[in-house]
Image (cartoon, helix red, strand yellow):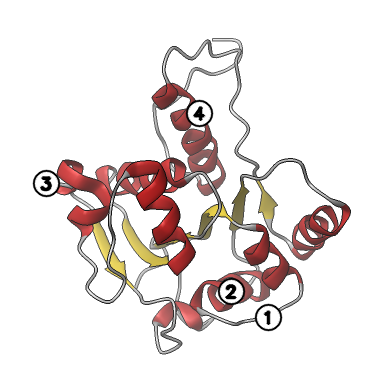
Amino acid sequence: MAATDLVLALTGASGAPYGVRLLEVLLRLGRTVHLTISPAAVEVMELELERRVRLDHFELGDLLGDAAAGLPGRVAYHDYRNFQAGIASGSFLTAGMVICPCSMGTVAAIAHGLSQNLIHRAADVHLKERRKLILVPRETPLHLIQLRNLAACAEAGAVVLPAMPAFYTRPRTLQDQVDFIVGRVCDQLGVEHQLLRRWGT
């Protein structure tokens, strides 16, 4: 446990490439990542990335493929049902948490303080401890209840960072667009990177 550790949760919104790429980038930078994944996220990853992740027998290679080899960082995997995990407590020090992608159901649970699984509880902990919590929703269009839930999360201290790629960077590939969002998340975490072209440069 260290105050430089980061928490990453993957939930069941479309946008699995964002979360998987973020994990890879953080590990390449040598960070320790406490990872938890919802069952719905597993379904989305299989659909969007054709990767089969087993929550009961987690293997990093199933998630990252060949990119998992030789990464200097470390993953501490926590089952989404495990409330005994350190990240369920405010006494466990971290440098922040990201939920990427963040489903609207997860947003609703956080907005209303419903700690129904480890992801919700860890997010609640980050809010109560006044630590960085970044939500990366990928949903469109948004109805009024979803907007109010996002506003409630922001009012409680979360950073709402929608997965909205920019075009001033002149992306040439889908990977460029993914890296833009991942880079903006890293900016919020204070993690240095070279993933995107800055405005004015």
Q: Amino acid at mark 4?
A: Phe
| C-alpha span from label 1 to label 3 | 38 Å
Of the numbered discs in the image, which one, if any, rests on residue 180?
Answer: 4
- Look at the numbered discs 2 and 3 and tell me whether their residues touch, using CB distance below 8 Å: no
- Look at the numbered discs 4 and 2 and tell me whether their residues touch, using CB distance below 8 Å: no
In which quadrant is the C terminus drawn? top right
Left or right: residue 130 versus residue 61 is right
* Residue picked out by circle 3: 70
Q: Amino acid at mark 3?
A: Gly
* Residue picked out by circle 2: 120
Q: Residues within 10 Å of mark 2 (few under 14, many from 20)?
A: many
Q: Is residue 98 visible?
A: yes
Q: Residues within 10 Å of mark 4 (few under 14, many from 20)?
A: many
* Residue for point 20% across, 46% down: 65
* Residue for point 45% across, 42% down: 18
Q: Where 8 falls versus 39 (above or below)?
A: above
- Look at the numbered discs 2 and 1 and tell me whether their residues touch, using CB distance below 8 Å: yes
Q: Secondary structure at mark 1?
A: loop
Observer-nearest of 11 and 157: 11
Q: Residues within 10 Å of mark 3 (few under 14, many from 20)?
A: few
Residue located farthest toward the front when viewing the structure as drawn: 47
Q: Of callouts 2 and 1, which one flags the residue occurring earlier in the amino acid sequence?
A: 1
Left or right: residue 146 versus residue 26 is right
Q: Of callouts 1 and 4, which one flags the residue occurring earlier in the amino acid sequence?
A: 1
Instruction: Give the image location of residue 192, x and y in percent.
Output: 42, 37
* Residue for point 61% across, 57% down: 103
Of the numbered discs in the image, which one, if any, rests on residue 114?
Answer: 1
Q: Of callouts 1 and 3, which one flags the residue occurring earlier in the amino acid sequence?
A: 3
Q: Secondary structure at mark 3?
A: loop
Circle 1 or circle 3, nearest the eye: 1
Q: Secondary structure at mark 4?
A: helix
| C-alpha span from label 1 to label 4 | 31 Å
